[in-house]
Image: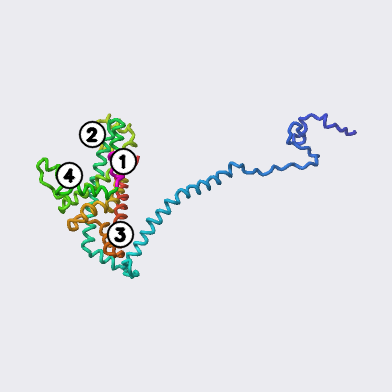
Amino acid sequence: MTNTQVPNSQVPNSQVPNSQVPNSQDPNSQDPNSQVPAVRPRPATPPAAAVRPSVRDRGTRLLAALFLAPTVVGIVVFTVVPIIGSIVLSLFHWNVIDPPRFAGGANYRTTFTDSTVLVSFRNTLLFMVLAVALQLLIALTLALALNGRMPVWLRSVFRSAFFFPLILSAASISVVMKYLFNQDFGVVNWLIGLVGVAPVPWLTSEHAAMATVILVYVWQQFGFSFLLFVGGLNNIPKEIHEAAALDGATGLRKHLGITLPLLSPTLLVASVVGIINALQVFEQPYVLTDGGPGDATRTVVMVIYERAFEQLDFGEASAVGVLLFVLIMAVTALQFRLSRRFVHYQ
């Protein structure tokens, strides 16, 4: 019996494996007998959009550094370097004329035993407590009053009027106030004399002098806290006050239970800035009373000025300045520590 060969064209497709039947319709399929090698796909090159962000980020960082450079240089030159210089100078005796002589801790020992320095620290702390408390109280009261129903133009007038003293020179304001509070020919005594009140020694009495310095300081400085409180009140959602009104909270109860907790971050900023400025008060007591009567209104910065530029003892003046710096840092750190319990963020 002879074997007959059947051509592939006559064999039904169902009996031939799929792997042996070329697909003419598939352009990627290749003839197994073909000598053309398969084309390998090229590695994908990263698109231009994937490279541009890194270049753009570097340019953004460089631009940000250029904008920050003047501020950073100013802080280093006018803040960091003087602080380090004061710490170093506090360890020496130096009167500008003779070469500096190393003193160790002698300047600090003299500072702690000097009655004038101790009284100045006591006066500064007393001034800080009274002035900052009065400043925040007046600023918050006025901000709440302007936050009520009032024409926009009238609210703008009051804001400008309250902020205006802050842009004036503290020394010039103190000169004017010194004439207003003069015991003999001052306008204040003339006004109270119209109602039968005897002239008050505003600047020559030990207790009245400190009160006068505090009033002049607060009159000039409360505008800053006032603007902070106005901004903070505008950020409180009106829906909260409306919901509180529906629950029956009105007047003082609403302010104590809702407004003050929501305004606590702004109150923290205003108190920190106010305390730092109050601890460095100089112009008002220097111009109004020159630290008198006696040492009743003498502050720490006045002592630094007198030691350095009147007595030419820059070592002791630097030691007092370092102690004031430590005091400011300690009070500020205490404020932020207490803020964890009393400051509420939305």
| Spatial separation of the CA atoms under disc 1 and disc 2 | 22 Å
Which amino acid type corresponds to the residue marked 4 in the rendered image? Val
| Spatial separation of the CA atoms under disc 1 and disc 3 | 31 Å
Residue contact at pointers 4 and 2, CB within 8 angstroms = no
Q: Nearer the viewer, mark 4 or mark 1?
A: 4
Residue contact at pointers 2 and 3, CB within 8 angstroms = no
Q: Nearer the viewer, mark 4 or mark 3?
A: 4
1 or 2: tag closer to the N-terminus:
1
| Spatial separation of the CA atoms under disc 4 and disc 2 | 38 Å
Write down the residue under mark 3.
321
Image check: 81 left or right of 168? right
Query: Neighbour class for label 2 at 10 Å: few (<14), some, many (≥20)?
Result: few
Query: Neighbour class for label 4 at 10 Å: few (<14), some, many (≥20)?
Result: some
**Of the numbered discs in the image, which one, if any, rests on residue 251?**
2
Image quarter (top left, top right, bottom left or bottom right) of the C terminus: top left
Which amino acid type corresponds to the residue marked 1 in the rendered image? Leu
- Residue farthest to the front, as pictured: 185
Whole-percent x, y for residue 214 in the image? 22, 49
Write down the residue under mark 1.
227
Q: Nearer the viewer, residue 159 or 245?
A: 159
Q: Which residues are magenta?
A: 160-168
Q: What residue is drawn where x is 19% and y is 51%?
A: 210
4 or 3: tag closer to the N-terminus:
4
Q: Secondary structure at mark 1?
A: helix
Q: Secondary structure at mark 3?
A: helix
Q: Secondary structure at mark 4?
A: helix
| Spatial separation of the CA atoms under disc 4 and disc 1 | 30 Å
Write down the residue under mark 4.
187
State how many labels appear.
4
